[in-house]
Image (cartoon, coloured by chain):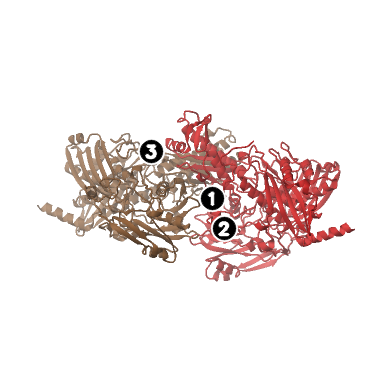
Chain colours: A brown, B red
Amino acid sequence: MEKNYRIVGKSVPRVDGVEKVTGAARYAGDLIFPGMLHGKILRSPHPHARIVSINAEKALRLPGVRAVITGKDGPGTLFGFLPQTRDRLALPIDKVRYIGEEVAAVAADTPEIAAQAVELIDVHYEVLPAVFDPEEAMAEGAPQIHSHVKNNMSAETHMNFGNVEEGFAQSDLIREDTYKTQEILHGFIEPHAVVAQWGPGEKVTLWASKQSPYIVYRNLSRGLNLNPSQVRIIQPHVGGGFGGKHEPFGLDFAAVLLSRKTGRPVKIVLDQEEIFFSGQRRHAMIIHVKLGLKRDGTIMACQMKLIADGGAYASVGQLSIYLPGAFLPLPLRIPHVKYDAYRPYTNKPFAGALRGHCIPQMRFALEGLLDVMAEELGIDPLDIRLKNAVQSGETTVNGFKITSCGLTETIEKAAESAQWREKRGKHHRSGSKVRGVGMATNSLCSGARLGGHDASSAIIQIHEDGAASLLTGATDVGQGAMTVLCQILAEELGLDLKEVMTSPIDSEMTPLDPGTYGSRVTFCSGNAVIAACQDVKQQIFAAVAPKLGTASESLEIGDHWVYVKDHPDQGMPWIKAVREAFYAKGQPVIGRGTATPGTEMANFITGEGNLSAAYSFGTQIAEVEVDLETGQVRVLKFIVSHDCGYPINPALMDGQLHGSVVHGMAQVIGENITYMDGLPLTTTLTEYGMPTAADAPVIETIHVNTNDEKGPYGAKESGEGSMISTLACVSNAIYDATGVRIKEIPVNPPALLRALKKQAAEARR
Amino acid sequence: MEKNYRIVGKSVPRVDGVEKVTGAARYAGDLIFPGMLHGKILRSPHPHARIVSINAEKALRLPGVRAVITGKDGPGTLFGFLPQTRDRLALPIDKVRYIGEEVAAVAADTPEIAAQAVELIDVHYEVLPAVFDPEEAMAEGAPQIHSHVKNNMSAETHMNFGNVEEGFAQSDLIREDTYKTQEILHGFIEPHAVVAQWGPGEKVTLWASKQSPYIVYRNLSRGLNLNPSQVRIIQPHVGGGFGGKHEPFGLDFAAVLLSRKTGRPVKIVLDQEEIFFSGQRRHAMIIHVKLGLKRDGTIMACQMKLIADGGAYASVGQLSIYLPGAFLPLPLRIPHVKYDAYRPYTNKPFAGALRGHCIPQMRFALEGLLDVMAEELGIDPLDIRLKNAVQSGETTVNGFKITSCGLTETIEKAAESAQWREKRGKHHRSGSKVRGVGMATNSLCSGARLGGHDASSAIIQIHEDGAASLLTGATDVGQGAMTVLCQILAEELGLDLKEVMTSPIDSEMTPLDPGTYGSRVTFCSGNAVIAACQDVKQQIFAAVAPKLGTASESLEIGDHWVYVKDHPDQGMPWIKAVREAFYAKGQPVIGRGTATPGTEMANFITGEGNLSAAYSFGTQIAEVEVDLETGQVRVLKFIVSHDCGYPINPALMDGQLHGSVVHGMAQVIGENITYMDGLPLTTTLTEYGMPTAADAPVIETIHVNTNDEKGPYGAKESGEGSMISTLACVSNAIYDATGVRIKEIPVNPPALLRALKKQAAEARR
């Protein structure tokens, strides 16, 4: 069914586009306030050490230095995602747990003086034994990083669905293997930045680069021993988040404590090197996977043991290891699942959420091993996915209720467009270069309950000239959320996009909204905007119904036109209707609306429960070229086929799908941080291997629209789900090209050359 | 009846008090933005001249100069208060109409460069004949200042109520006289200041010192040929308004046009000299008053002809001359009224609203002549006022409906406290100094409909910790409005004041509210806050009623306690109720409320209609000491007795009453601007004669509480009404001391000495 909307479903330009391309958009680091000071952080040189004493006398004597703070300036209250995993202080007081952890901070008249001053702070450490390997950290006798847990276990999860023993018993082919993935950064272009202003009274205001001010203000207030309402977050433009900006970090606390001490606004902006030295990042993982298949390719059982390197703090770690387990049987059906995951602490920067939140790593292992087994069974990877593809109406073994589901269509359309049957297994060779194709699937929630209050809300104010202002706590971190919400508002009220205005988040003015995580914004905040529009309509209709000689319920809104549903010509212009409401009733029109994720809380320990009201589905096919002489991998082309229900803005949706490809392929063939005894040796994005636009493959996107019943205009997730399949997809393509099974990423040229040589040697045997 | 509230009715400290006394509060002039430029205005040296050409080449060549704008950079659209009185452009294009009018403006890297650059702009003028005296301006053949009106008449009003001829025919004593008042400044300590940022898109944001952002954005948008919603006003702290900051001024337009030209934020802050050279101020007036009294003192008729010097533009002039007429029969009853008022243009800075908005001048004439006549009739000024005091339940001859009214009580209590009977007419003399007492009465509206949408609104958001954020478009210009609104909110929801937060006005985020004028804030915005609280309660009650085993309607809120009305111990803590609403229903609590002034529009031309839903009443008694040798007047003591219904914050109410005394007495005995051919010779506050704290008399305040039925907690006007009687009160006291009748203010020592000499000479005759 083709829908015909005025603004929704159209690739309108971003509402913040002009601002951003002209450089007018202001980010936290751009802000200037009267009397503002500049902060700089002193970081630990040791991966694990007791802080014996800190002497800041020399620093304080440096002209232009206004204050020095340490962890002792904080209240000493722990904060964290779940009550049982609260393990962080504003700044550490007694000991440091990774190289780069914040130990003290200086506020000075200029950034240069502040940088000079931190060097003058004398810290006396008592160095402790450290542990960097997650398996070693779990072992008996390892150095203990936190005293409140045993064996450094920050979180663990044990799921048991169906009967995995029985599942394997019914299988014709059982294989198991171990896959390893590295840690990666979020790669946002705007570094962490904050300006904090203490006061008036026992309050603090932060202008901060955050993707979820609501979660930040909760945790900041715990770490500062304040009530949430005493922490006000105002959000400037944000230059990318990807899961990495929904927690408070050392710089936030340092800026607050420095401002409290000086009474002046304090700005701290991290440089890229500092980001390499501090939390948070994607969990590195060791994944043992065992899979049982019927001869016909039906997946019968999966057992997985997953070890995630948590780094020094818990962060959202309980969720991080819940998600790979919960999404094991999605989007490829698995009737029997056993999943055991462990997230030990290590003396490294801590890990947390990053686009796809740990599910891509799981998928890399699962769909890698699946391809190995399909080959053994003589089944095309395409067919084995089609065979096991989950369908609308099913409930997964752990209770995920599948409503709209276009998975099969995404697989078929991707395969067709990629000429899968023609290209797969052909090892097309030209000179030293060989080509191959790989495929993988993905699914993700569209928002989820993560505890506490987690409804999105919207307030709409109508101006006397008929324009509308939208107040929302939803966060645009660059993904275009505001554009999508403005489109929905304009469509609902029959306005043009330029008549819709949004304001930056201000936790004291904009309504509560959990912000950008869990792929919730379009789904939850979009529904909240629709609810607020309905509230607006109700007020306008009540005011004009008598004039139009009908009842409120008979009225509808079209293009700047309020009319009787059954007689579209019988109506009045929107502006006249607005004025009628304003002047006749003598009061302005304010609409409010809220929308919950629409589910109950899932159990993050046992994995039970339906996480989301709507799941997205997708398939990716990559075509790669491997140079057998150099080991260099080039990703030539990507087909990304995605069921986001209905794209409110197809161009923005494409932007997300493009991003998922580049973001994900970089983890397979490039990005890496090298450590030496906990010291990151990689300190620039160039060394790190972040791809640029020039590295991007040709990307073709396919929108499979399933018009989800509960999504706004049928829309569901599109921001991060697609990346879930990218690791598996690229590594499966490398296998198709070379016959080398990638079980550890990143795969760099020397590693691939070694593997190719080993393969050749085995072939000769 | 004694009321017992937790927070309302208590003299709690101002919510912005600490900020202000510690210097942390930021005013528009304090703001800094990245890339900000500084603007300076070139002003006309001629009172009336055609602009032949403007050459800015030299200015533009000065290093650091970024742009020059003139009136031609504006769209050439007129704006103004009423459609028929739109006579102002962003900046004048063809001609200037007063010395100091804005002709061009420069944006430069520093204020110093900008100041240097304006001197380099060459303007070629053709000087036109000018007129400065309002009576001359009305005469045939006077230079015509605006082409759209004849005889320079910017506004006139003719009221006829009862039958004034008949009233005089029934009178036993008829007298008439002419009174004159000077123009004065508002005397705000913070000068006009603005930062404007054009864009993104066809939008502009202003951080501006305004007392009514809503009215400003309407007029700004007209002058810029934009829609109101394209102009966003964000209000920092405001250092006083007094009626002088609800219009856009040349600096606002100049900053906008300079920002549009440069793409950068532009700040303009006026210095005090510029304020003496530019609009707006209090109308100077010539008032011919004729009064008819019965022998027993009953006022029978009043005829008044009032000429208000409008200066070069209309401003809110139609309202300015409506108000003195409309308030003629209040608070002293007059059954027959004829009122003719004229507001001619002259070649001077324009006049508009100022505390009491033209009513004090009328009262100065009326209650001056009344005292003269009372003396002739042998009646004590106290008794003649008691005799004619309007009472609750009456309707004035022009239709003002008097509901709560404590006038008689204010007169009696003031007289008792001042020992009126003992002191009046005693001419107590000590050396060359003689003392006397004077009395006058006042009444004012508590908000009024002034056209367009004029409801106040409030949005309240409840935080998860139970605190509440209030969004309101009401403006705190120093009077303490936010404190009063927070007290109301805290009282309604059973919170402590520190749990209530307010945010600065932002026309894109805070709800529409006409702002601070017409003494409307406590009454209208207060009622809006109550309505929003009721909305909050409804949501909370609905969520917790099942838990408390009762219906929503049976619930009430006390001190952090939600309970069953009839069983106050049966309840739950507020925070638990909030969480119940948040978590059980999964959505945050947002309350909204609006409140209109509660009346129909009065007719500003004919004077008909009930202006306000509630009128305040008050009496002032001044005790002055006149040095017969020097002519110096010292105001020793003031008794201010005021019926504001019920003071939400008695200390803030006292602050207002104190202010009315000092503000008003200054107009009688001090403040004055000397002109020479339209050139203000007075350019500093010292020359001008603004009193300081040291000049303030002893002030005793009396609160007469009438608990207005429609006012929030019974409250009505308290901000400006009291000043209405001050001019009359002080001049009546000077008469009582010296026998000299003050008919022209200000009365400076030489003038008073001359009058004393003349009086002595007459006495000798």
**Residue B65 visible in this rendered orientation of the protein:** yes
Q: Nearer the viewer, mark 3 or mark 1?
A: 1
Q: How far is the residue under mark 2 from the one under mark 3?
A: 49 Å
Name the subunit of mark 1: B
Q: Count all numbered tags in the image, as a single digit.
A: 3
Q: Nearer the viewer, mark 2 or mark 1?
A: 1
> Label 2, on which residue?
B194
Marks 3 & 1 on one chain: no
Q: Amino acid at mark 2?
A: Val
Q: Are marks 3 and 1 in contact (CB under 8 Å)?
A: no
Question: Which mark identifies residue A157?
Answer: none
Question: Which mark identifies residue A708?
Answer: 3
Quarter location, residue B675: bottom right
Quarter occupied by the N terminus of chain A: top left
Q: Amino acid at mark 1?
A: Pro
Q: Provide residue A59's location: percent of width, then percent of height.
A: 39, 64
Q: Provide residue A706's location: percent of width, then percent of height.
A: 36, 39
Q: Provide residue B385's location: percent of width, then percent of height.
A: 77, 44
In front of the other: A94 or B429: B429
In front of the other: B302 or A117: A117
Q: Are marks 2 and 1 in contact (CB under 8 Å)?
A: no
Name the subunit of mark 2: B
In front of the other: A28 or A301: A28
Name the subunit of mark 3: A
Q: Provide residue A128's location: percent of width, then percent of height.
A: 27, 55
Q: Earlier in the sequence, mark 2 or mark 1?
A: 2
> Label 1, on which residue?
B504
Q: Amino acid at mark 3?
A: Asp
Quarter location, residue B119: bottom right
